[in-house]
């Protein structure tokens, strides 16, 4: 009986995130080849066992090459990894220890898309991009009193129906009603980056004014 071909990086994911992997069934391929039928099996397993790190989810959920928005999907994941994460974690090691998670999915332009979670010691961020805008929920331990520079309507309650894929209970009220748990919309990557840039600058100022717990103080000191 021939063994199932599996790319070495996908096999590593299987060993870490999948249950009851029988090594004897697989032949590890170091050229990146994986049996298409195995990809389907892993994709289905993944969908029922979220959350999972973004990189592991992506390896078995690459959009079909004929989809027009395939490249734009790749751009949004790259944007989070290489532009947003460094604003929240200055050190590469900290980014690796706190990977972006896929906690749910939604679909737009025929592409299966992740709902992302980024977790820090002071707050959890839930994000999705449907190729039209970003929706973001913030659940913070720290009151956020910073000026959002009119990036979004601080008085707007974003309807759940427009937060496609968000799990129940993770769409909050407006920023003006709660500066610790709120949901908002921004139009593009630039506005999302600006929000996190302003947030980081605000956090860096807190060490001079507030006495938060040791973990949060250490986090802020590293920014």
Image: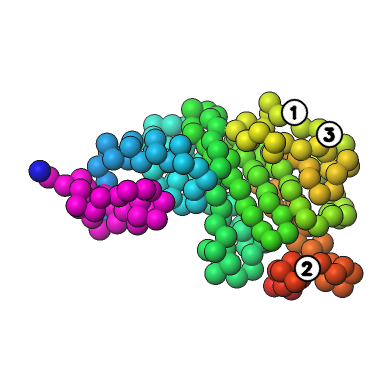
Q: Are marks 3 and 2 in contact (CB under 8 Å)?
A: no
Q: How many dots with numbers?
A: 3
Circle 2 or circle 1, nearest the eye: 2
Element assignment for label 1 = loop
Residue ID for mark 1: 159
Element assignment for label 3 = loop
In magenta, the rendered stretch is 2-30
Element assignment for label 2 = loop
- In the orientation shown, which residue stands out farthest toward the front? 20
Magenta span includes 25: yes
Q: Position of residue 67 (x, y in %)?
A: 43, 32
Can see residue 220?
no
Q: Mark 2 or mark 3, which is nearer the start of the sequence?
A: 3
Q: Residue at x 85, y 44 (%)?
A: 178
Q: Compute the Cα span from label 1 to label 3.
A: 9 Å
**Viewer-proximal residue among 139 and 58:** 139
Q: Position of residue 23 (x, y in %)?
A: 24, 53
Q: Residue at x 53, y 63 (%)?
A: 96
Q: Residues within 10 Å of mark 2 (few under 14, many from 20)?
A: few
Q: Mark 1 or mark 2, which is nearer the start of the sequence?
A: 1
Residue ID for mark 3: 156
Q: Quadrant of residue 223?
A: bottom right
Can see residue 53?
yes
Question: 131 left or right of 68?
Answer: right
């Amino acid at each position: 009986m021939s063994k199932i071909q599996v790319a070495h990086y996908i096999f590593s994911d299987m060993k870490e995130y999948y249950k009851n992997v029988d090594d004897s069934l697989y032949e590890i391929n170091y050229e990146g080849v994986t049996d298409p039928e195995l990809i389907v099996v892993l994709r289905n397993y993944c969908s029922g066992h979220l959350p999972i790190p973004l990189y592991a989810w992506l390896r078995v959920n690459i959009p079909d090459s004929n989809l027009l928005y395939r490249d734009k999907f790749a751009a949004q994941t790259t944007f989070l990894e290489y532009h947003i994460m460094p604003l929240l974690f200055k050190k590469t090691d900290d980014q690796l220890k706190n990977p972006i998670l896929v906690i749910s999915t939604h679909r737009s332009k025929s592409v299966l898309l992740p709902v992302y979670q980024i977790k820090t010691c002071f707050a959890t961020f839930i994000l999705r991009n449907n190729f039209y805008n970003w929706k973001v929920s913030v659940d913070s331990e720290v009151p956020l009193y910073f000026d959002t520079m009119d990036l979004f309507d601080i008085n707007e309650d974003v309807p759940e129906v427009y937060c496609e894929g968000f799990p129940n209970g993770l769409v909050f009220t407006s920023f003006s009603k709660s500066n610790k748990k709120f949901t908002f919309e921004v139009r593009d990557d630039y506005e999302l980056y600006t929000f996190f840039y302003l947030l980081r600058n605000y956090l860096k100022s807190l060490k001079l004014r507030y006495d938060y717990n040791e973990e949060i103080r250490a986090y802020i000191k590293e920014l």
